[in-house]
């Protein structure tokens, strides 16, 4: 009898073309081509969890990298558990412009979309 390894598929996060374009523009403004956008989830916000966006030039051991059109987004494993299957988008409308996350794991979110609950 042979042992069978169970392979656990890691959750994916996708970037919209609009998000990739905006990230590339922001990195160009910083004049540091080695930057990656770091997306994280932490406790807080109106709904229990909140999204965080920052730039980072380091890749940690528990990070996963997602790429589109030459830009990279890194997400730590703990945050990825809450973001699996999500899409990161950049939206411009009459009230402003922002990164938004379409998260299939969220059961509700606040009006501005920066926090959510599961």
Image (cartoon, helix red, strand yellow):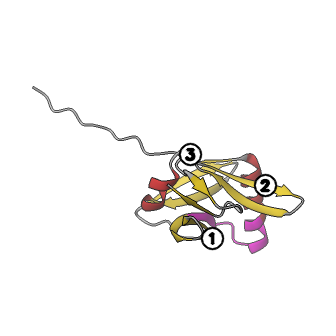
Asked if the residue at tag 1 contacts the one at tag 3, i.e. Cβ–Cβ closer than 8 Å, the answer is no
* Residue 78 place in picture, x, y as percent: 43, 61
Q: Residue at coordinates 13% horizontally, 28% vertically from top-left?
A: 2
- List the residue tagged with mark 2: 91
| Distance between the alpha carbons at the discs numbered 3 and 2 | 18 Å
* Residue 11 place in picture, x, y as percent: 47, 45
Element at badge 1?
A: strand
Residue 104's disc number = 3
Q: Residue furthest top?
A: 1
Left-right relation of 95 to 36: right
In the image, 9 versus 91, the foreground residue is 91
Q: Residue at coordinates 32% horizontally, 38% vertically from top-left?
A: 7
- List the residue tagged with mark 1: 54
Element at badge 3?
A: loop
In the image, 72 versus 54, the foreground residue is 54
Asked if the residue at tag 2 contacts the one at tag 1, i.e. Cβ–Cβ closer than 8 Å, the answer is no
| Distance between the alpha carbons at the discs numbered 3 and 1 | 22 Å
- Label 3 vs 1, first from the N-terminus: 1
Task: Specify the quadrant of the image occupied by residue 104.
Answer: top right
* Residue 48 place in picture, x, y as percent: 52, 66
Is residue 86 shown above or below 24?
A: above
Q: Residue furthest left?
A: 1
**Few, some or many residues within 10 Å of mark 2 (<14, 14–19, 20+):** few
- Label 3 vs 2, first from the N-terminus: 2
Q: Residue at coordinates 52% horizontally, 48% vertically from top-left?
A: 105
Q: Residue at coordinates 56% horizontally, 48% vertically from top-left?
A: 13
Task: Specify the quadrant of the image occupied by residue 101.
Answer: bottom right
- Label 1 vs 2, first from the N-terminus: 1
**Few, some or many residues within 10 Å of mark 3 (<14, 14–19, 20+):** some
Magenta extent: 26-39
């Amino acid at each position: 009898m042979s042992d069978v390894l169970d392979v656990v598929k890691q959750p994916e996060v996708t970037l919209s073309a609009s998000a990739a374009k905006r990230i590339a523009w922001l990195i160009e403004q910083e004049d540091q081509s080695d930057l990656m956008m770091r997306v994280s989830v932490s406790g807080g916000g109106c709904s229990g969890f909140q999204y965080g966006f920052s730039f980072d030039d380091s890749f940690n051991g528990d990070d996963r990298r997602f790429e589109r059109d030459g830009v990279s987004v890194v997400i730590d494993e703990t945050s990825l558990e809450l973001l699996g299957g999500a899409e990161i988008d950049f939206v411009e409308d009459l009230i402003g412009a922002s990164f938004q996350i379409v998260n299939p794991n969220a059961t509700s979110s606040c009006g501005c979309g920066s926090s959510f609950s599961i």
